[in-house]
Image: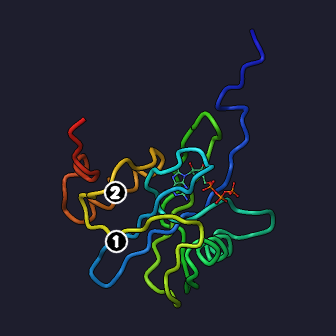
Amino acid sequence: MSSSTTPTDRKHTEVAVGILIDAQGRLLLSTRPEGKPYAGFWEFPGGKIEAGESVEQALRRELHEELGITIAAAQVWRVTEHDYPHALVRLHWCKVFDWQGEFEMREGQAMRWQQLPLDVAPVLPGAVPVLQWMAQERGLDPSAAQARTTA
Ligand SMILES: Nc1nc2c([nH]c(=O)n2[C@@H]2O[C@H](COP(=O)(O)OP(=O)(O)OP(=O)(O)O)[C@@H](O)[C@H]2O)c(=O)[nH]1
């Protein structure tokens, strides 16, 4: 057949993602900066893991670069995959309850603390399963984790 690339022969991009949860149980979402694929979509903060980094180290670096905060310990909670046209990503999700510093949007993003269901939209497709699990943990209908839209 042709030389088209199938999901099985594409290399995964490893990504560390933080689910920051505040004292009221709210989740931090931010918008993807201009110039990146899916710019303007809402996502959980994080980014690509660099060679030699653990998930926790990558997440600590990314959240410092993007948000100006320093996180305490973070353990991987779930691992998911999503096949985008631009990349096949493996997302390492960590819940984060402790951090230090003041939030500064260093990449010009918007940020919102959100309860479920969210009231921001649209959300990056790769983040949807995690929103559903978070809703389930809270005794909510997983299919209603995202904002209702009138589209
Ligand atoms: N940060 C983040 N990335 C996500 C989420 N869901 C999801 O599918 N992704 C995907 O994971 C990848 C993260 O890459 P990124 O471009 O944000 O990472 P980065 O900041 O290191 O990028 P750069 O070094 O290219 O600037 C993207 O392909 C993005 O689509 C999410 O909730 N948060």
Which residue sits at x=54%, y=68%?
A: 76
Give the residue type that dot 1 points to: Trp
Instruction: Give left or right: position of 27 versus 36.
Output: left
Measure how far apart labels 2 and 1 are at the Cα level. Answer: 18 Å
| Left or right: residue 43 compared with residue 134 | right
Q: Is residue 44 above or below residue 105?
A: above
In percent of the image, x 47 and y 86: which residue is there?
A: 98
Q: Is residue 139 above or below residue 73?
A: above
Q: Would you identify the image quadrant in which residue 112 lies?
A: bottom left
Which dot marks residue 121?
none
Question: Which labelled disc corresponds to residue 133?
Answer: 2
According to the picture, the residue beneath numbered tag 1 turns out to be 113
Could you say where residue 14 lies in the image, as x and y percent from the top left? 66, 54
Please, what secondary structure does the residue beneath circle 2 have?
helix
What is the x, y in percent for residue 107? Answer: 59, 66
Residue at 56% from the left image edge and 57% from the top image edge = 33
Q: Where is residue 80 in the image (x, y as percent from the top left)?
A: 52, 51
Residue farthest to the bottom, as pictured? 100
Q: Residue extending furthest right?
A: 51
Of badges 2 and 1, the one in the foreground is: 1
Image region (quadrant) for ligand 1: bottom right
The three-letter amino acid code for the residue at tag 2 is Trp
**How many discs appear?**
2
Q: How is the image coloured?
A: rainbow
Pinpoint residue 56: horizontal percent, then vertical percent.
63, 74
Going from N to C along the chain, the mark reached first, 2 or 1, is 1
Image check: 20 left or right of 36? left
Report if the CB atoms under discs 2 and 1 are less than 8 Å apart: no
Ligand 1 is within 8 Å of the C-beta of the residue at disc 1: no
Q: Does mark 2's beta carbon lie closer than 8 Å to ligand 1? A: no
